[in-house]
Image (spheres, helix red, strand yellow):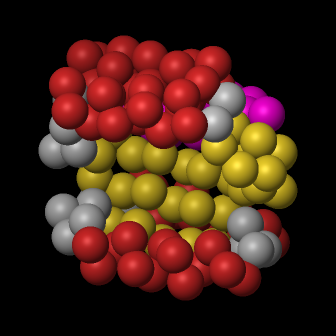
Amino acid sequence: MLEMMEIDIDNAIAFRIAGKVTEDDMSVVLNAAKLKIEQYGNIVFLEQIDSFGGIELAAIVAEFKYLFDVGMGNISKVAVVSDKKWLKNIISIEDKIFRNIKIRSFSIDDRDSALEFLKAP
């Protein structure tokens, strides 16, 4: 399940994951991203992962289609908020792979720092 969140950053896409991510969930995020890109040009993401029960194959396909059509050039930062230790390792690797995007992990208790990271130039 994915739930969109409102945060005090105009060009942000923010959501919370608890359980399995479906194709419908992914469509909601990707459509919101397209709209924000049209409006602001450059976007940031806040992903709060409370629990992760996997992701549907159709959701992965939808994400790849989005990346093929829109690309990643409009994403400047991603903050992942979670207390899952295994995610920190993945995020560290992603930060090295996607050099044009600043990707950082934050604990649930440090969510305010994640917001400051996204707001900083």
Q: Residue at 43% of width from left, 32% of height from top?
A: 61
Query: Residue 11 lies in magenta, yes or no?
Result: yes
The residue lying furthest to the front in this view is: 57
Image x and y of residue 42, in percent: 25, 38
Residue drawn at 55 percent across, 83 percent down: 89
Question: For this view, does 6 lie left or right of residue 10?
Answer: right
Tell me which residue sits at (44%, 17%) in the image. Answer: 31
Quarter in which the C terminus is drawn: bottom left
Q: Position of residue 44 (x, y in %)?
A: 40, 45
> On the rendered structure, is 50 left or right of 69?
right
Task: Residue 18 in the image: state x and y as whole percent.
Answer: 82, 45
Q: How many marks?
A: 0
Viewer-proximal residue, 31 or 69?
69
The front one of 39 and 15 is 15
* Residue 57 at least partly seen: yes
- Quarter where residue 94 is shown: bottom left
Q: Is residue 39 above or below residue 41?
A: above
What is the span of residues highlighted in magenta in the rendered image? 1-14
